Image: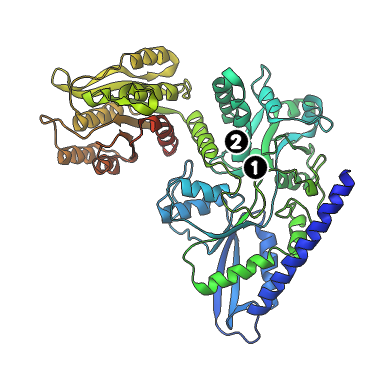
C-alpha cells in the first residue's frame, strides 16, 4: 500500500515539475537577451544552510545570460542569519521583536529575503510592521524539525528507532524526577527552537488541570539548557563515546533535519539520531520573500530567479545540502536519516508548501509561546503599580461585570505565577491623597519572590478602588526613583503601571516638570524601563508615550479591560536583555 502511494506521489511530482520547468524556461527566454548593456544588482539574503544552493543556481543563471529589458542582472547572494535581517526590517518598519536587538548601523535590507521560516514574516507583522507585505512568500525548500538525540541515548532511553514517540512523551521525560538533559537554541532568534517550543508547550497545554504547572516546568527545564547560537548548542553534544561523557553531555534538542545530517556528515564519535516526534512540528519552510519597495527591474529579476529556484535541478542542489524540496520530497543524492517520514506522504508536518507567510501558522500560539518563554527565561526586578482611583470601580460587561480593578488584579496574579523565584517584585497602588497628601501607597516593597510570593498574593487581595482621582505624574516619578534606588546589575529593572485615566492631580507636578525630572535623573548605565498599560477610552496615549519616550519601555492602550493580561505579558516579553 505504501509503495503504491509513493508511486502516485512521484507521478504527481513529475507532472508538477514539467509545469515548473516549462514556466522557468519561458521566463528565462523572456529575460535572457544577448548583448545586454548596463547592470542591475539583485541582493538576495538567504539562510546560511540554503545560501550555497541559491548562489550556485544564480551563478548558472547569470552565466547563461540573465537580463531584463537589455540590462544584465547581477545576483549577489549573502548567507545571512535570519535574526539579523529581521532586525533590519523591524527597524525600517518600526516593529519590535522579542529577543531581537537593534540592527547594526551598516546592515541593509536585501531585495529578496529567504529566511529559514515563514514565522519571521509573521512575527514582523505581529510586532508592528503592519505595512510589511513582501511579494511571493512561497516556499523553495523544506527541512523537518526533529528531536536530535545522541544515538546511545536515543536507543536506551527513548526506544529509538523502533518506538514512535510523541511530544507528550518528551514532556514526561523533560519534567521527570530524572529529567532528560535538554537544550534549545534561543527560540526568539531560531526558527527550529521556536518550532520545538511550540510543540512542547502545546503538549503541556493538554495536561488538563496540570497544564499551567506542566507548561511552566517545561519552559524552565528548557531554559536551563538554552544557547544563544546553534553552533554553541551543537558543541554541547557528547564528543566521546564513553558512558561518562555521554551521561554529562546534551541529551536532546529541537533542531532541523538538515542540522542533524550536517552534524553526522562530519563523522562525530557519537552520531545524532533524528527523532520525528508526533504530531509533526512546524518545519523550516524557507519562504522566498520579495521585499516591498524595490524597483521594477529588480522585481522582474526576482520573479525569474524564483522560477530558477523551483526546477528539478535546484531540488538536486538542495539534496546535496541535506535539504528537501518545498513539498517535502527530496532530490537525487539525499540520504535521509533513519526513521525519516516518506516524502510522498507529506509526513514532515507544517503549513502546505506555497501557502504564504501565514499559511497554516497560528499567530496567537506563536506570540503566546514567545511571551511565555521570554518571561520564564528573564531575571528581573519589577515594581507593579495599580491605579485604584474611583473610575477603577467601573464594571466590565465582557468579564461578567467584574470591576476594572478586579480584572487588573487577576491579570497581575496570573502573571505572577509565570515569574520564577529569581525575580524581585514589589506592589504599589495609587490614586490621589492615598496616604495623607501622597498619591501612592507601598503595599509590598520590592523583594525576591523566593521569600515574598505569599505576601504579594495577599497584597493583591487587598487592592480596592478609592474615591480619589488619578495622581499619575507624582506616582510615576516616585516609582522610577524607588526602582532606581535599588537598581541591580544583570537584570531588567522596570516599572509596570496600570491606569484607566489621565493625570488629574491639581496639587501634583506638571507634565513638563515630570519629563524634565526624569531626563535629569536618568542614568544610561543604570537604565529603567517604564511600561504603562492604559485601560479604557479615558486614557491619553500621547500622555503615556511622552513618559516612556524619556524612560524607555512602552505604552500599551486597550479599550477592552479583558485584554490587560495578554498585554501585560507581551509588554514584559518585549523588554530588552538586561545590561551587565
Relative to 355, say whether 239 is above or below: above
Determine whether the residue tagged by mark 2 lies in a helix, strand or loop.
helix
Asked whether, in this view, residue 530 is left or right of residue 353, the answer is left
Which residue bears the numbered disc 1? Answer: 282
Q: Quadrant of the C terminus?
A: top left
Relative to 330, say whether 494 is above or below: above
Q: Is residue 489 visible?
A: no
Which residue bears the numbered disc 2? Answer: 198
Q: Quadrant of residue 206?
A: top right
Pointers 1 and 2 in contact (C-beta within 8 Å) = yes
Q: Quadrant of the N terminus?
A: top right
- Which residue shows up at 68% across the image and 18% down it? 178
- Which residue shows up at 44% across the image and 23% down it? 414
Residue 80: percent from left, percent from top: 58, 55
Asked whether, in this view, residue 124 is left or right of residue 242, the answer is left
Relative to 396, say whether 83 is above or below: below
- Which residue extends farthest bottom? 35
Question: For this rendering, which residue is in front, 167 or 3?
Answer: 3
Amino acid at each position: 500500500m505504501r509503495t503504491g502511494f509513493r508511486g502516485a506521489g512521484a507521478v504527481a511530482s513529475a507532472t508538477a515539475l514539467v509545469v515548473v520547468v516549462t514556466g522557468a524556461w519561458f521566463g528565462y527566454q523572456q529575460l535572457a537577451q544577448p548583448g545586454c548593456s548596463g547592470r542591475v544588482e539583485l541582493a538576495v539574503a538567504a539562510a546560511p544552510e540554503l545560501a550555497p544552493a541559491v548562489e550556485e543556481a544564480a551563478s548558472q543563471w547569470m552565466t547563461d545570460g540573465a537580463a531584463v529589458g537589455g540590462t544584465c542582472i547581477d545576483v549577489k547572494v549573502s548567507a545571512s542569519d535570519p535574526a539579523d535581517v529581521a532586525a533590519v526590517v523591524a527597524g525600517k518598519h518600526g516593529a519590535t521583536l522579542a529577543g531581537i536587538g537593534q540592527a547594526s548601523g551598516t546592515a541593509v535590507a536585501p531585495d529578496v529575503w529567504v529566511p529559514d521560516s515563514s514565522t519571521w514574516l509573521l512575527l514582523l507583522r505581529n510586532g508592528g510592521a503592519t505595512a510589511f507585505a513582501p511579494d511571493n512568500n512561497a516556499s523553495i525548500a523544506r527541512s523537518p524539525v526533529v528531536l536530535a538525540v545522541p544515538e546511545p541515548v536515543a536507543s536506551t532511553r527513548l526506544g529509538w528507532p523502533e518506538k514512535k514517540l510523541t511530544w507528550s512523551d518528551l514532556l514526561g521525560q523533560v519534567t521527570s524526577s530524572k529529567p532528560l538533559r535538554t537544550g534549545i537554541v534561543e527560540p526568539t532568534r531560531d526558527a527550529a527552537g521556536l518550532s520545538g517550543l511550540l510543540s512542547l508547550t502545546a503538549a503541556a497545554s493538554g495536561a488538563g488541570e496540570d497544564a499551567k504547572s506542566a507548561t511552566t516546568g517545561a519552559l524552565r527545564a528548557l531554559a536551563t539548557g538554552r544557547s544563544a547560537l546553534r553552533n554553541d548548542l551543537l558543541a554541547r553534544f557528547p564528543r566521546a563515546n564513553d558512558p561518562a561523557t555521554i551521561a554529562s553531555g546534551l541529551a536532546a534538542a529541537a533542531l532541523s533535519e538538515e542540522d542533524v545530517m550536517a552534524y553526522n556528515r562530519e563523522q562525530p564519535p557519537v552520531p545524532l539520531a533524528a527523532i520525528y516526534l508526533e504530531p509533526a512540528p512546524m518545519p523550516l519552510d524557507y519562504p522566498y520573500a520579495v521585499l516591498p519597495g524595490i524597483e521594477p527591474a529588480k522585481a522582474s529579476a526576482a520573479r525569474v530567479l524564483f522560477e530558477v529556484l523551483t526546477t528539478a535541478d535546484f531540488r538536486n542542489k538542495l539534496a546535496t545540502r541535506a535539504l528537501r524540496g518545498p513539498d517535502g520530497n527530496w532530490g537525487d543524492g539525499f540520504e535521509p536519516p533513519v526513521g525519516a517520514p516518506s516524502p510522498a506522504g507529506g509526513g514532515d508536518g507544517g503549513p502546505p508548501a506555497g501557502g504564504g507567510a501565514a499559511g497554516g501558522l497560528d499567530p496567537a500560539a506563536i506570540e503566546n509561546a514567545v511571551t511565555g518563554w521570554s518571561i520564564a527565561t528573564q531575571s528581573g526586578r519589577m515594581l507593579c503599580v495599580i491605579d485604584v482611583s474611583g473610575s477603577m470601580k467601573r464594571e466590565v460587561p465582557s468579564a461578567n461585570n467584574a470591576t476594572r480593578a478586579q480584572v487588573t488584579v487577576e491579570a497581575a496574579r496570573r502573571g505572577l505565577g509565570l515569574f520564577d523565584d529569581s525575580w524581585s517584585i514589589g506592589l504599589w497602588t495609587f490614586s490621589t491623597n492615598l496616604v495623607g497628601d501622597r498619591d501612592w501607597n507601598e503595599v509590598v516593597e520590592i523583594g525576591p519572590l523566593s521569600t515574598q510570593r505569599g505576601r504579594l498574593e495577599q497584597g493583591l487581595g487587598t487592592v480596592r478602588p478609592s474615591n480619589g482621582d488619578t495622581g499619575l505624574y507624582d506616582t510615576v516619578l516616585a516609582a522610577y526613583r524607588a526602582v532606581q534606588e535599588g537598581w541591580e546589575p544583570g537584570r531588567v529593572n522596570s516599572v509596570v503601571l496600570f491606569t484607566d485615566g489621565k493625570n488629574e492631580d491639581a496639587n501634583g507636578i506638571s507634565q513638563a516638570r515630570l519629563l524634565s525630572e526624569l531626563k535629569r535623573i536618568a542614568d544610561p548605565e543604570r537604565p529603567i524601563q517604564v511600561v504603562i498599560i492604559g485601560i479604557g477610552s479615558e486614557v491619553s496615549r500621547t500622555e503615556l508615550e511622552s513618559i516612556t519616550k524619556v524612560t524607555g519601555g512602552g505604552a500599551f492602550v486597550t479599550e477592552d479591560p479583558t485584554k490587560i493580561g495578554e498585554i501585560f505579558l507581551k509588554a514584559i516579553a518585549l523588554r530588552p536583555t538586561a545590561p551587565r
